[in-house]
Image (cartoon, rainbow, N blue to C red):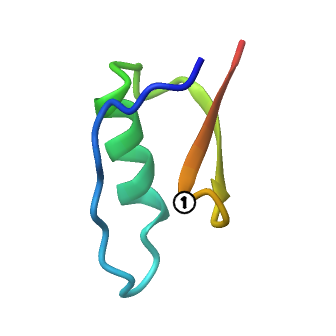
Amino acid sequence: MEKEIGRVYISKQGDCRVYLRKAVVKALNLKTNDKLIIEIDEKAKRLIVTKLE
């Protein structure tokens, strides 16, 4: 299921993992305590988000 739900722009200064996670949680309407795996596919220029049960 691939669907563009929005775009997130993050500056490359410092460690942006926390901001990336917050943006993904907000965009996908998830809970902040959900366990997520966020993979970066640079070739396709997309993020792959997997929610663990």
Which kind of residue does numbered mark 1 sit on?
Answer: Lys
Element carrying mark 1: loop
Rendered view: 26 above or below 40: above
Q: Is residue 38 left or right of residue 46?
A: right
Residue at position x 67%, y 57% in the image: 41
- In the displayed structure, 52 sits above or below 15; it is above
Q: Which quadrant is the N terminus positioned in?
A: top right
Residue 8 percent location from the top left of the image: 29, 53
The residue sitting at 32% across, 45% down in the picture is 23
Q: Nearer the viewer, residue 43 or 50?
A: 43
Taking the spot 31% from the left edge, 68% from the top edge, the residue there is: 10
| 47 versus 25 height, above or below | below
Query: For the image shown, how many numbered marks are present on the structure?
Result: 1
Report the quarter where the C terminus lies: top right
Furthest residue in direction bottom, as rendered = 13
User: Outermost residue toward the top?
Assistant: 53
How far from the left and from the top, in percent, is residue 30? Answer: 40, 20
Residue 17 x %, y %: 49, 62
Judging by the rendered image, the residue that carries numbered circle 1 is 45
**Number of other residues with Cα within 10 Å of mark 1, as a class: few under 14, some 14 to 19, many 20 or more:** few
